[in-house]
Amino acid sequence: MTVHLSRKYGFFAAHRLHAPGLSDEANRALYGKCNNPNGHGHNYEVEVTVAGKVDPVTGRSIDLNLLDALCEQQILAPFRYRNLNKEVAEFLTGNPTTENLATVVDDRLRAVWNEWFSAAGPKLEKIRIWETERNICQVEGQGRTQHES
Ligand code: NI
């Protein structure tokens, strides 16, 4: 039987949302305080959901130490206390909306997932990111990388 396990992580980071194709006025209207020219911060929460079989010996569907180490390497260490627009490669020319951030997290985990877990092991199922209590984005299934390849 397949079970679904979710684990939450948190990091603080700064961003500025700005769409180059829109006027300054339209950007201010669209993004509000997230368009502040000097950026501003969020306490992001990331929930990673995996699907797997329960190991009869351990009673677990995934090695949580491995998942923690993977998330630390791919997401938390590169993002924590950073200015996403200036220090995260995907956002040097990209717009770090909650949607794009969820997609980048999904891509970064999928890119190396098979190096961390066996083919018969747990699968990455879903990413959810809370930018605020009211702004939450979810990415499910195959990531952007898989769709485009
Ligand atoms: Ni913001």
Image: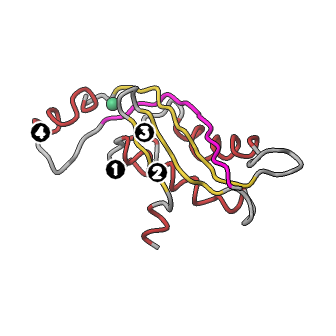
Q: Which of the numbered marks, if any, corresponds to residue 26?
A: 4
**Drawn side of residue 1 relative to residue 135, left or right:** right
Residue labelled with disc 2: 104
Amino acid type shown at disc 1: Gly
Under circle 2, the secondary element is helix
> What predominant SS class does the magenta segment belong to?
strand
Residue labelled with disc 3: 84
Under circle 1, the secondary element is loop
Of all residues shown, which one is farthest toward the front? 1
Q: Which of the numbered marks, if any, corresponds to residue 94?
A: 1
Is the residue marked 1 within 8 Å of ligand 1, measured from its CB? no
Q: Which residues are magenta?
A: 2-16
Between the C-alphas of marks 4 and 2, the distance is: 25 Å
- Find residue 32 and report its horizontal and vertical position in percent: 21, 29
Q: Residue at x 49, y 67 (%)?
A: 146
Between the C-alphas of marks 3 and 1, the distance is: 10 Å
The answer to which of marks 3 and 1 sits earlier in the sequence is 3
Q: Residue at x 59, y 33 (%)?
A: 9
Amino acid type shown at disc 2: Val
How is this picture coloured? secondary structure
The answer to which of marks 3 and 2 sits earlier in the sequence is 3
Amino acid type shown at disc 4: Ala
Q: Quadrant of ligand 1?
A: top left
Between the C-alphas of marks 2 and 1, the distance is: 11 Å
Q: Which of the numbered marks, if any, corresponds to residue 43?
A: none
**Drawn side of residue 115 relative to residue 129, left or right:** right
- Find residue 76 and report its horizontal and vertical position in percent: 58, 38
